[in-house]
Image (cartoon, rainbow, N blue to C red):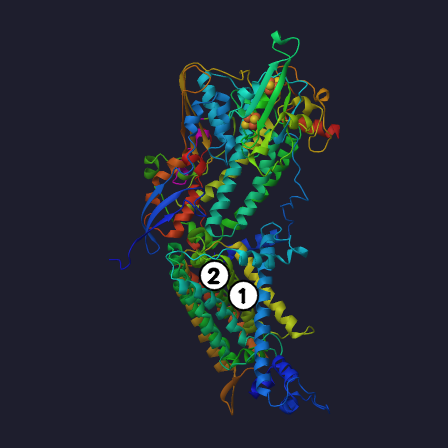
Amino acid sequence: MSLSEPITVNVGPQHPSTHGVFRLRVTFDGELIVDLEPVFGYLHRGSEKLAEERTYTQVITLTDRLDYVSSMINNQAYVLACEKLSEVQVPERGSYLRTIAAELQRIASHLVATGFLLNDLGALATPLMYCFREREKILDLFEMLCGARITVSYMRVGGVFQDAPEDFWPAFKTFLEEMPYYIDEYEQFLVGNEILLMRLKGGNTVSKEQALNASITGPVLRSTGFSWDLRKVDPYEIYDRFDFDIPVGEQGDNFDRFYIRLQEMRESLRILNQCFKQIAPGPVRANVPYLYRPPAGDAYGRVESPKGELGFYLVSDGGIAPYRCKIRSPSLLNLSAIKEMLVGWKLADMIVTLGSIDINMGEVDR
Amino acid sequence: MYGLGILKGLTVTMRNFFRKPFTVQYPEERVAQHPRFRGEEFTWYEERCTGCASCAKYCPLGIIKIVTHPGGEHVSEGQEYAIDVFDIDIGRCMFCGLCVEACPYDALFMGSGFEEGQYSRKDLVITKDRLIKADKKPSTWFRPQLESQQYNSQSESPVDWENAGREPWPYHMPVRPQSAEESLEQGEETK
Amino acid sequence: MNSLLESNVIFRNVYCFWAANPGNAEQCTPVGAVAVKDGLLPGGLEWLAYVMAGLSVILLIVNVYLVFAALYTYVDRRVLAKFQGRIGPNRVGPFGILQPLADGIKLMTKEDLVPAGADRWIFNLAPVVMMSSGILVLAVLPFGKDSFVVDLNIGILYVFAITGVNTLAMFMAGLASANRYAMFGGMRAVAQLISYEIPVVLSVVGIVMMAGTMSLVGIVEAQKVPFIFVQPLAFFVFIAGSSAEMNRSPFDQVEAEGEIIAGYHTEYSGMKFGVFQAAEFGAVLITSALIATLFLKGWEGPFLPSHVWFLLKLFFFAFIFIWIRATLPRLRIDQIMAYAWKFLLPLSLINIFVVAAEVLLLGDQITDSSGVSMDLTTSDMWIMAGINVVVAIVAVIGLAKITGMDARESTKVANVTRVIKGT
Ligand code: SF4
Ligand code: SF4
């Protein structure tokens, strides 16, 4: 029997740690969570509907704004769907450039996730600043590639819009050489820290069955020990050429999710190194007309985004704009087991779990 | 264990304490921008623009407003239209650059600045006069002809339309050399 | 009346400045001087001179405290920024040193909001209570040689009694705000601060036993060897416990900004918020001063003037607090409570027993007019230091093992299985 009276608190939509405008209606018994209900839709912009009004190329700018910390990968998922629709063959160099951009973006996104997780843990933005320092370098590389840092719109149906400038390669090489040192520094800083381990270990677990039933993907699924990475199980683009591993967790707790991200950064660096060695001269873009009309039909393009499986389902009626565009957003589906993860834990765990799932409201609400 | 991890963390922060700050003091110092930077303040060469309105059509937001009237000698050939209005509402622009990609005559370029703050939304509309008067400092984004001249919009003087060059179609498929390593070597040779 | 005049330099000087000749002849004649200088007031008004001396000392101390608290906000932000690879405030004045002033002006010109459902009286009273508890502690702190307001014989007890009021202020603020986050903050404040009071107070018992006095001045004078060496365990408990009491990371549950917005002062704005902030930053200064006094010989030190030594030590500890704050994530509320009760409390008890035994064995008993006391020589203290360091290490490791606070199992890094190509 509990002597206290449960109270309901609206965590969000304006709350420092909900990663955007997200609301959780939580019933607390003291500090204990007894019930919760996620409420979202505050950032709904109707991307799917807007896509029906735009030509295939113009939709690329919409995908930038889904998960705004991994725009490159959103671009990639969308153009892959388009290419499946019209069976365009991407030139090799284009594929390599896409892979480079996507893996850089994965590192950047994981850096943001790690930094904000630590910020949610209360480390006063110090790890966040360190992570952003490295992310800044990646964004500089993006600026070289495409002139923008966040809303990149770099990829086009049939390749990328433009070859990398010449000064990109030296900068890229320096980045590849420097980055392992900084990842080591994060490990030294964070992984052994007792407070962090006490907070993250064993908490807010999700089992393999739960995760699969809730169709959770990405690091959250891999933390349960289930090795599922689209780059391995359904290699898109040229991922079958690279030698890399998939870090898998054991218990599906917060720590595994956090640690998997750190490991994945290393794996991404491995891929990037191989890309750097293998990339050969050639065209970067297939000859796809600017205003192109894919044949009528449908296609589903999916990639392994930093958050999970990001998919675009496109239906074409042969016109210049998609007839229907459905976005399978990993952030939204990863939230579906949040009640199981959180009920019975404390208020502080809720914030940390939101951080370790790494949701992005732009993608949840679309 | 036993606080050793915490001590390790403390050494990392201490090491960073003695590093130089990585932030910059913005108005005085600036981070270097790449010439490809897609800035505001579009660069538009009215000598080249035919008023075809491809840019307006391809803009996802429809924020370019073009009004023309038949003005020259070869109107029937789709050229020589006089442009009355050429407004870009950069208050709504997202600097995606699709308009630049769409322009078939290399008349529209992205700009290189980013400090277009105004007190009123109305002032954010770049009109034809402003475009003509503006410093012509085009970004090299999607303009390989500028890039091959090693033009740097951040440091160099404005370029007029004759120097901005035209790119032979199809400009998006340059057969350039270079695996990554080759281009590195090349870079070193040129130094 | 005379004790104050004798013991306190500032007080005596101000008094002599005002009081007329007959009243100040006794106190103000320097040894060997012939003429006694007249004060400004006419004769017979010595009581007024006394009051004015008191008021000016209060004014001086309070203002110095506030200026230092403001300065400390600046130092805190700059140092924290340096840890994070940033620059920090550097725009207002040279190196941004006037930033606290700018902040103050900003806060004062802001609208002072009171939420509709709030309990107005308590809501407005809370910052005052919070601030006054900080200021009252200053009465007994020795800032330098012969500079203190009073040398209370129960000084350390007084300090703990007064700082305990902080809890009340936070609870008042939290409950009166009619905000659920503020209430969370208030409840956490009560739970956490009261729990940590116990190990902190117990850790000081060892020091009192060695010094044989509760007066802060007496404790400083008793430190033939800095107590940080003699009682490392007490130092550890004190520094951990007091950082919990100031709500500094890793124990900043009370105002965990990621969880409960700003805790008990969520609803405060304008200068009331500023007062909370000033009180909090002041608390860091006071705690650092206390640590310096209790464990690092207070104002004593060679070559430099005593006040400089005191400030140096104070800012050294303040720096350590910033360093810790910049590095560590925060614990969860139940872990914080467990840490206090399962770890710090036994440690402080161990410390008391060990120190008591050592004092009994090593000390020489002296009986004088004030009663029986134990006298420890410098070499005794060094012997104790040697023993206590070993005891501290054994106790920390042993207790961590027993209570599971060593996070041992946790260090086992996630077993990352590698899935090689083609799965
Ligand atoms: S940059 Fe994009 S949004 Fe801006 S005018 Fe050009 S096409 Fe439109
Ligand atoms: S697309 Fe180019 S040529 Fe045509 S109207 Fe726009 S700027 Fe002028």
Horizontal and vertical percent for residue C244? 46, 63
Please tell me whether residue A225 belongs to the stretch shown in magenta: yes
Q: How many numbered tags mark residues here?
A: 2
Residue A61 screen position, x and y as percent:
51, 28
Q: Earlier in the sequence, mark 2 or mark 1?
A: 2
Label 1: how many Cα within 10 Å (few below 14, some 14–19, many 20+)? many
Front tag of 2 and 1: 1
Classify residue B29 by image quadrant: top right
Q: Which numbered disc covers residue B40?
A: none
Looking at the rendered structure, the secondary structure element under dot 2 is: loop
Amino acid type assigned to the residue bearing label 2 in the image: Asn
Chain letter, disc 1 residue: C
Query: What range of the chain is rendered magenta?
Result: A221-234
Binning the other alpha carbons within 10 Å of mark 2 as few (below 14), some (14 to 19) or many (20 upward) gives: many
Residue at mark 1: C282
Disc 2: which chain?
C
Please state if C143 lies on the left or on the right of A219 as rendered: right
Mark 2, residue position: C247
Outermost left residue:
A1
The image quadrant where one finds the C terminus of chain C is top left
Residue C94 visible within the image: yes
Q: Is residue A250 visible?
A: no
Check residue A115 for magenta coloring. Answer: no
Q: Mark 2 vs mark 1: tell me if same chain.
A: yes
Q: Quadrant of ligand 1?
A: top right
Disc 1 secondary structure class: helix
Mark 2 residue CB less than 8 A from any atom of ligand 1: no
Q: State whether residue C246 is above or below residue C256.
A: below
Quadrant location of residue C172?
Answer: bottom left
**Residue type beneath disc 1:** Gly
